Amino acid sequence: MTEHIDLEQSLHMYQQMAKIRAFEEKVNELYKSAKMPGLAHLYSGEEAVAVGVCEALHRDDYITSTHRGHGHCLAKGARVDRMFAELLGKEAGYCRGKGGSMHIADPDSGNLGANAIVGGSMGIATGAAMSAKMRGSNQVAVCFFGDGALGQGLFYEVANMAALWKLPVIYVCENNLYGEYTHHTETAAGEFIARAKAFGIHTEIVDGQDVHTVYAVMQKLVARARRGEGPAFLQCDTYRYYGHHVGDINRAYYRAKEEEAAWRAHRDPLTILGHWLISNSLTDQAVLDRIDADVNAEVETGVAFALDAPFPDVREVNEDVYA
Amino acid sequence: MSDRELTFAEAIREALAEEMRRDARVFIIGEDVAEAGTPFKVLSGLVEEFGKDRVIDTPISEPGFSGIGVGAAMTGMRPVVDIMFGDFLGLVMDQVANQAAKVHYMSGGKLSVPMVFRTTMGATRRSAAQHSQSLHAWVSHIPGLKVAIPSTPYDAKGLMKTAIRDNNPVVFFEDKMMYKLKGVVPSDDYTIPFGVADVKRAGNDITLVATSSMVQVALGAADLLAKTGISAEVIDPRTTLPLDKPTLIESAKKTSRAIVIDEGYEQYGVTAEIASVIADGAFYYLDAPVKRMGAMNVPVPFSPVLEDVTVPTEQTVFEMAKMLCRKA
């Protein structure tokens, strides 16, 4: 029975990760074929973090996301077609075309929005946790951010208050090694988790490429947050396959092609989970292939929908400035 | 009851208390807001009535608790964030201008940020360059924010209640030199709509548009002008964002002359915006250029003899108005 549930859930997580991967590959194509306005920051390679974290959350739990946020949105429950529509600036997008890649918000799935200011949502996530505590709703809030955001002072202010007030917030630090074009060893002194420990915050470091590990640790952190035991800091070691954004093609000056190839070859989250499922005889390649085919079809349908969808009426430009 | 007098500070406190009684989602957060009641004692007594869960003392972390306010507002609460000195807006501008102001628009209208940033303004308190500025122009520049800048205890109470009930982020400026100013404040529940200017004194020869503490200065100047036979109309926009343009323009059309007086720095300031609105809307009715009187374009100095010359006074406004009204 337990094995059955594990299998079902594992396949679901595989599907979620595969969907994010397929989505991001399509975004890259849209950019390269000049069909997408602006830029995007791809999440490929980091899928196990978003999926492992969000799998441990309820739909009404909150997340805040980042400029590299497509994976968070999808993992929390956003639809592929409306995501693409937003990326293309269409009326059917999650923000009616006003937000774009870096600002997707979907309150229906608890997503309080991606944020284009690095570390900018740390206050929002902590405030959402405080609000949940004040309202007695038993919700938790997850703040996604990258290793680069540890350079922002806001974190140290809100983490201090979250610890003082035992707020149900989990700070998920996606350590993909680089802040923009700079390795973290050049920008962050000391250990990442030491920052949170200084406030007495519970910390964990996990392999961010292994979705089972992320999920298991996250379940524990969510449970203690719901019990009123306060905030946690989860460092997920991961890797972004692409550059800082889709236009960051020539990366050799800051990271080696060999390093990128090694992560793809040995640390890919989809491969790791697929291998685990097959080597434990829980499923076979055909099942995984079918999942891949399903999500690819969903992505193709979604992007076709978005390409055909109308742009907003230009008269909407000054709507929604005020509530 | 209708002629009961309160100080400006008491009016603010009464508005907060009434709204906190009316709506359990309203809470106050900031530095030394609870037992201390802020350095200006504006909030004294509130923690006794509402408890420390709704009058929340924070560390000295303005960006942090401002951001927490934004997140709480997005998820069903109505925070009133206390930014002790307006100068500290420099610390919190990302949360104010990039987060609170933009969430509703960026989300296509799905999220909203019903919150109030209470802060102070006003020089001549001998507090020097980092505790004396009037920075309401900064936030009046940002779409998505509303900015209230009351000049009387009556307006302070009514505008604060409107600010708390508004579904948008409102920055509320209280001139700390006016906290002890007394005025009639009804004890009943009333609100004052944003974007509606108030004629503080009717007149025919010149329009004095004034904000916050400069309203008292303009009224004093109007008294002096009356003695020389010049009838000045004093208008207080009460909110700089939204701005009641029609009332300002109509008054200038009627009087044919206007001075805009505001305690923010004159360069690129609130006076420039309002003067431009009047020049644009009343051009063919004007007998003189619209004049601006803001704070001098210098950091606010400490020494009283230096500080006092940086802001408009009854006398300087009087002189400017007299000069404008002099028949050519």
Image (tube, rainbow, N blue to C red):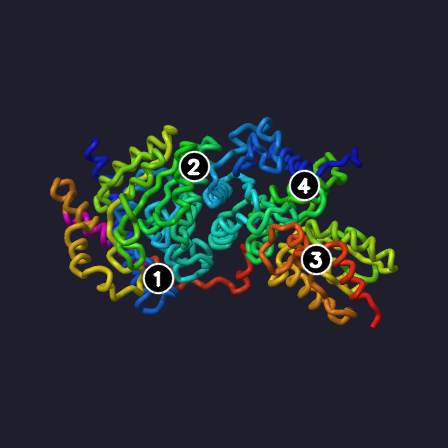
Q: Give the labeled residue for mark 2.
A: A161
Left or right: A202 in relation to A82 = left
Extent of the magenta region: A285-301
Q: Secondary structure at mark 4?
A: loop
Residue closer to the observer: B299 or A270? B299
Left or right: A295 in relation to A169 = left
Q: Secondary structure at mark 1?
A: helix
Q: Give the labeled residue for mark 3.
A: B261
Q: Are marks 4 and 2 in contact (CB under 8 Å)?
A: no
Q: Amino acid at mark 2?
A: Met
| Labels 3 and 1 positioned on one and the same chain | no
Q: Secondary structure at mark 2?
A: helix
Q: Quadrant of the N terminus of chain A?
A: top left
- Provide the chain ID for the residue under circle 1: A
Front: mark 4 or 1: 4
Q: Give the labeled residue for mark 4.
A: B179
Residue depicted at 64% across the width and 62% down the height: B273
Q: Give the labeled residue for mark 1.
A: A304
Left or right: A5 in relation to A225 = left
Q: Is the residue B261 above or below the residue A203 in the image?
A: below
Label 1 CA crowd tier, 10 Å (few <14, some 14–19, many 20+)? some
Q: Amino acid at mark 4?
A: Tyr
Quadrant of the rendered image containing residue B206: bottom right
User: Mark number for residue A88?
Assistant: none
Q: Is residue B31 visible?
A: yes
Queried whether the magenta region covers residue A141, the answer comes back as no
Front: mark 4 or 2: 4
Q: Are marks 4 and 1 in contact (CB under 8 Å)?
A: no
| Labels 3 and 4 positioned on one and the same chain | yes
Q: Amino acid at mark 3?
A: Ile
CA gap, disc 3 to disc 1? 57 Å
Label 2 CA crowd tier, 10 Å (few <14, some 14–19, many 20+)? many
